[in-house]
Amino acid sequence: MEKRWTVPVDGKQYVIEVDYGVLLSNDEDSTEVLLKRDGKLVVNGQEVKQWEAGDLPKEISFEVGGQPAMLKKKGLFVKELELIVGGQSIKSS
């Protein structure tokens, strides 16, 4: 996985992981795809959400230990993500 957080909720630890997904082609003029891997959001080893390669949603809402959670893109670049659980921003591990 490409990004990971460890989040404590009510005395339990939850591991949240994101695989952004990859879509690479030969060159700009080619429609041939060399590598395609869909993205996914995983909580404690269980897939919560999946998306097409190269198409990470701006926001993903889900739950962690009964608490509302949201994964948000912070800027133009895919790797700038913010995780919010129970209204608090969580730093990646």
Image (tube, rainbow, N blue to C red):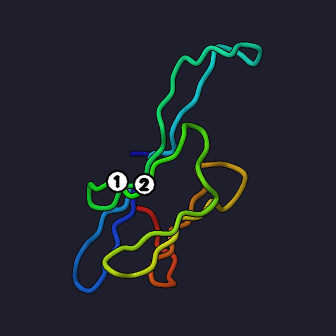
Tag 1–tag 2 contact (CB < 8 Å): yes
Residue at figure coordinates x 26%, y 86% from the top left:
10
| Residue 6 rendering spot, x and y as whole percentages | 34, 67
Q: x%, y% of residue 86?
A: 45, 84
Q: Quadrant of residue 85?
A: bottom left
How many numbered marks are there?
2
Q: Residues within 10 Å of mark 1 (few under 14, many from 20)?
A: few
In the image, is residue 11 above or below residue 55?
below
- Residue ID for mark 1: 47
Residue 7: image quadrant is bottom left
Is 36 positioned to the left or the right of 43 in the image? right
- 37 relative to 44 in the view: left or right: right
Q: Can residue 73 be seen?
A: yes
Residue lying at the far left in this picture: please name it: 11
Residue assigned mark 2: 41
Crowding at dot 2, Cα within 10 Å, few <14 / some 14-19 / many 20+, comes out as many
